[in-house]
Amino acid sequence: MARIVAVANQKGGVAKTTTVVNVAAALEEVGQRVLIVDLDAQACATFSVGLDPEDLERTGATAFLDPEARIPIADLITTTDDGPDLLPAAIDLAGADRALAAIAGREYVVRDALTAVQDSYDWILLDCSPSLGIITINALTAADAVVIPLQCETLSHRGVGQLMETIADVQRLTNPRLQVAGVVPTLFDGRTVHARAVLADLGPRYGVRVFSPISRSIRFAEAPAAGRSILATAGSSRGAQDYRTLAREWTDAIPTV
Ligand SMILES: Nc1ncnc2c1ncn2[C@@H]1O[C@H](COP(=O)(O)OP(=O)(O)OP(=O)(O)O)[C@@H](O)[C@H]1O
Ligand SMILES: [Mg+2]
């Protein structure tokens, strides 16, 4: 059974999508079968692995927003040149809060949809949007573990407290087995005293595991346009190595179910 990991932070631009795409590629490199689930209507993960969201007739939303129809999720999954499989997203997911408002059990539509493919993968990585809306609640409800990317730029990580409260609510109400695997320091520039101070502060501040940081690199800006991970476009770069290290750390930190 796949380990299901939600990569979440309602703050935008902290490298959630970059982390999902590159950890997925790093896990594939060591022979793991990985499914990326794009849960953001902006569809950046879908785009980053080489698909044009506007060309898609059906996406994950096809199943999530109409759970009664019981559309087989396997029919919505596609392969990618990068290696991992993908359950894509497009702008249709933007209507989720309204579409699911009247549905009983609306927190469980992602979990229920993924059940059918859980045995086909070693890992299912959920790329959350920068919000704490119903689809992010769904991701946390479906997940065995949540990983929180945090930018190493500011001492005040405003909003992390609110995310932790949401996680605690999910643990209490819809998913008692959800573990906080840890935080991933992203966009890290080890040359600055400030970034090193922020990094040192993370563990004591949040009382969670701090994974190895991901260095800031221009390579990350280039890769998505090519529709590939940085492991494919700059495989020996520092950033690629950082994500290989992170994938190994997740493998140790997140138990198989
Ligand atoms: N280590 C890095 N070094 C340099 N740039 C990076 C790094 N990681 C991510 N980026 C860049 O930062 C931007 C935001 O990254 P990304 O889209 O992964 O964040 P996100 O948290 O998924 O954003 P959103 O909240 O909008 O979904 C992107 O342009 C990406 O290329
Ligand atoms: Mg994103």
Image (spheres, rainbow, N blue to C red):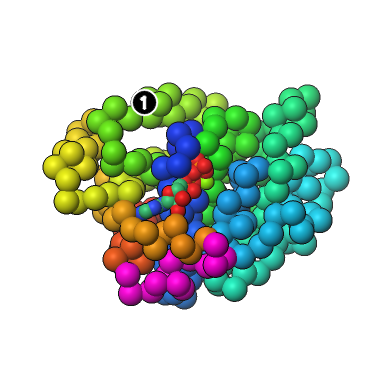
Residue 87 appears at what percent x and percent y? 66, 57
Q: Residue at x 50, y 51 (%)?
A: 17
Point 21% across, 38% down: residue: 198
Q: Amino acid at mark 1?
A: Arg
Q: Residue furthest right?
A: 69
Residue under the point 33% across and 48% down: 186
Q: Is residue 70 left or right of residue 117?
A: right
Give the extent of the magenta segment: 225-237
Quadrant where the N terminus sits is bottom right
Residue at mark 1: 158
* Residue 40 horizontal/vertical position (percent): 61, 43
Rendered view: 107 above or below 23:
above
Q: Residue visible at 85% across and 45% down?
A: 69
Left or right, 150 with reference to 93: left
Instruction: Give x and y (percent) for residue 233.
Output: 45, 72
Figure quadrant of residue 250: bottom left
One can see residue 143 in this view: no
162 falls in the magenta region: no
Q: Say whether residue 92 is visible.
A: yes
Does dot 1 land on a helix, a strand or a loop? loop
